[in-house]
Image: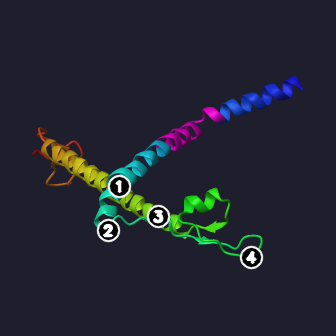
Amino acid sequence: MLEFLKRNLNEFKTFAMRGNVIDMAVGIIIGAAFGKIVNSMVSDIIMPPLGWMMGKVDFTNLYFTLPNSSGEIVKYPSLEAAKSAGAVTINYGVFINTLISFLLVAFAVFLLIKAINKLQALTKKNCEAEEALETKSCPRCFSVIDIKATKCPYCTTDL
């Protein structure tokens, strides 16, 4: 029994220490932190001015109250009041708010990825420009060679 536990523990240790498992764990942790940043950006930066521009629109109090055990539908002044009274409700306003929040988060992530891609393209272009300053093309074999070369290392043409 002890041998079985040791063997399984060693197999688990080997599995857990593989690079892809650790990379995945790091990705999940960073993803969770990034999700908090994006949610904060949407709820604290984007939603307040958007709600203000739309006339302080809040769909939270849009709901249906389902009939109680005696079959009657009781009207409540707010969703919070309905919940505290123990009424069964269909909260379509909360769903609308969540949907709007999701669309804003998706758009914010789109803009962020777009900015990252633009930055990467700019960095790549700068690297290519630096490489172009450090290299030239052989007129005979078209190989890329150092700018200071006087003879092509590939076809031995004098430059």
Disc number lying in front (4 or 3): 4
**Which amino acid does the dot numbered 3 rest on?**
Asn
* Quadrant in which the N terminus is drawn: top right
Amino acid carrying label 4: it is Gly
Q: Label 3 vs label 1: CA separation?
A: 24 Å
Q: Label 4's element?
A: loop
Q: Nearer the viewer, mark 2 or mark 4?
A: 4
Q: Earlier in the sequence, mark 1 or mark 4?
A: 4
Q: Front-most of 147 and 88? A: 88
Mark 4 vs mark 3: which is more N-terminal? 4
* Residue in the picture at 56% in, 63% down: 79
The answer to whether residue 26 is above or below residue 71 is above
Q: Which mark is on residue 79?
A: none
Do the residues bearing badges 2 and 4 touch, measured as CB atoms within 8 Å?
no
Is tag 2's residue or tag 3's residue first in the polypeptide sequence?
A: 2
Q: Are marks 1 and 2 in contact (CB under 8 Å)?
A: no
Question: Which is more N-terminal, label 2 or label 1?
Answer: 2
Residue at numbered disc 3: 97
Left or right: where 66 falls relative to 45? right
Residue density around tag 3, few if under 14, some if 14–19, many if 20 or more, within 10 Å = some
| Residue 149 visible to the viewer | yes
Residue drawn at the location 70% of the way across and 74% of the way down: 67
Mark 1 or 4: in front is 4
Left or right, residue 21 beside residue 59? right
- Which quarter of the figure is the C terminus placed in? top left
Which portion, as a residue range, is magenta?
Answer: 16-30
Q: Which mark is residue 71?
A: 4
Q: Tag 1 or tag 3, which sits nearer the N-term?
A: 3
Q: Which residue is mark 1?
A: 113
